[in-house]
Amino acid sequence: MTVMDLTAVSEAFETAAPSAVIAWAIDNYASAGAGDGVAVACSFEDAVLIDLAVSVKPDIEILFLDTQYHFAETLWYVEELRRRYDLNLRVLSPLVEPDNRWQADVAGCCGARKVEPLNRALAGKKAWVTGLKRVDAPTRAAAPIVSWDDARGLVKVNPLATWTPLDLAVYAAERQLPANPLMERGYPSIGCWPCTKPVAPGEDPRSGRWSGLDKTECGLHT
Ligand code: SF4
């Protein structure tokens, strides 16, 4: 497909159910790469994307970037969901040892602990599925549902792009999904513990990420 074809597909999916978008990605790319051509990158902030993805393809590859700085609650949640869904979980570790880089060089730290491992995991894939949502941040407000990820050379699929926090909450309640314990403690957006603070009700959910720094993205979605 050309970039224009992908743009047309994306526009056609504006009102489609996320499961239909995931099914399209699997139909078009799942068997086209080395091993499985489609991978789902999950932050394990909640279980919505995983629940949708495994409902379409139970053995779809789920990626977790173990930065070595996740909250204990998130690591517990990863294991909880792995057991619940018998996930085909691929844990990506960075090629560096734990260090203090996050204290002085967050861009370099995210590069080594998130971007490089993700790029390594996506090598040979034909498409990746993310949990990115337009409401996450102004920088994501125009995110397409399907696009060409030029930097990595594969198709990027954002099946939840149009969803709001209410959509997520309704889906999670209907499906009785377990929650990351940090959510009820004021962490609506969850990253690594050195770079994530709780936020007050009504505040920008992502304002707790890299608080006080001129940084809003880790580099996975740029
Ligand atoms: S979020 Fe913070 S600790 Fe995690 S990889 Fe980025 S800079 Fe490092």
Image (spheres, rainbow, N blue to C red):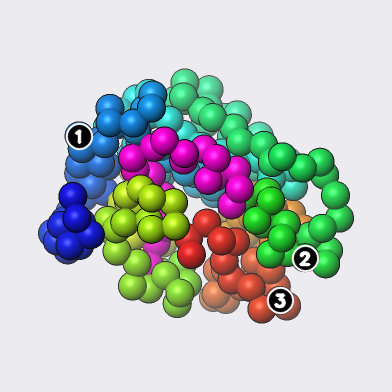
Q: Which residue is mark 2?
A: 105
Question: Does 125 appear in magenta?
Answer: yes
**Extreme right residue here?**
100
Is 84 drawn above or below residue 207 in the view shown? above
Residue drawn where x is 17% and y is 62% of the image: 4
Quadrant of residue 217 within the rendered picture: bottom right
Q: Quadrant of residue 76?
A: top right
The residue lying at 38 percent from left, 50 percent from top is 153
Q: Mark 1: which amino acid? A: Asp
Percent of width and height locating residue 199: 64, 69
Regarding residue 44, the answer to whether it shows in the image is no
Label 3: which residue? Answer: 213
Q: Secondary structure at mark 3?
A: loop
From mark 3 to mark 1, how far is it between C-alphas? Answer: 41 Å
Q: Which residue is mark 1?
A: 27
Which numbered disc, 3 or 2, marks the residue closer to the eye?
A: 2
- What's the amino acid at mark 2? Asp
Q: Residues within 10 Å of mark 2 (few under 14, many from 20)?
A: few
Q: Which span is picked out in magenta?
A: 115-134
